Amino acid sequence: MVEIGTRRWWGNCVWDALGIPALLKEDARVVTACGCCHEAMTLEIQGDTLLKIPGVAHFALPPRAWWHDVVLTRGTMLLFRSEEHVERWRHLWRQPRGAIISLEQQWRLAQAWYEDRLSFDWRRKTSEEIQALWRELGFTSSFWALPR
């Protein structure tokens, strides 16, 4: 759950949970649980800074497959206490090892992705713009490659 003042939203995945405060550009708390052990985890955002960085984000599916099954995709973009917890979860749920990124990278992704989303002249990013964003964030492995 994302809390901003007295307002609350549900983020379907780690990307959405950090996307809400990035979009609204307000201080926030993200209250969630580890995808593996379900222990409570809280992220704090003040200004444009992610203050508490207690774990990692894991994307089981590569971006080129996200639209094949959006529900599955969102259900496998999760926050974990550690890479060890990602591995436990993967083996339990028979999921592929996708990409593990730091929460700082995930926060920067959310900020870049949603920075202009409320703008009147917003438009969807092109594949080229997305690939440039991936590179800027250090997502350079073949996992992040989009179809041409």
Image (cartoon, helix red, strand yellow):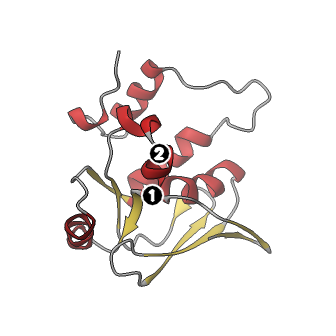
Left or right: residue 15 versus residue 99 is: right
| Badge 1 element | helix
Q: Quadrant of the C terminus?
A: top left
Q: Position of residue 21 (x, y in %)?
A: 64, 57
Cα distance between the residues tagged 2 and 1 = 18 Å
Quadrant of residue 77 within the rendered picture:
bottom left
Q: Judge the density around disc 1: few (<14), some (14-19), many (≥20) Cα neighbours within 10 Å.
A: some
Among all residues in the image, which is located at the extreme bottom? 39
Among all residues in the image, which is located at the extreme top? 148
Q: Position of residue 1 (x, y in %)?
A: 62, 71
User: Looking at the image, which residue is at 37% across and 40% down?
Assistant: 137
Residue 137 visible in the current orientation: yes
Mark before the other along the chain sequence, 2 or 1 = 1
At label 1, which amino acid type do we have? Gly
Q: Position of residue 42 (x, y in %)?
A: 51, 77
| Badge 2 element | helix
Residue 136 visible in the current orientation: no
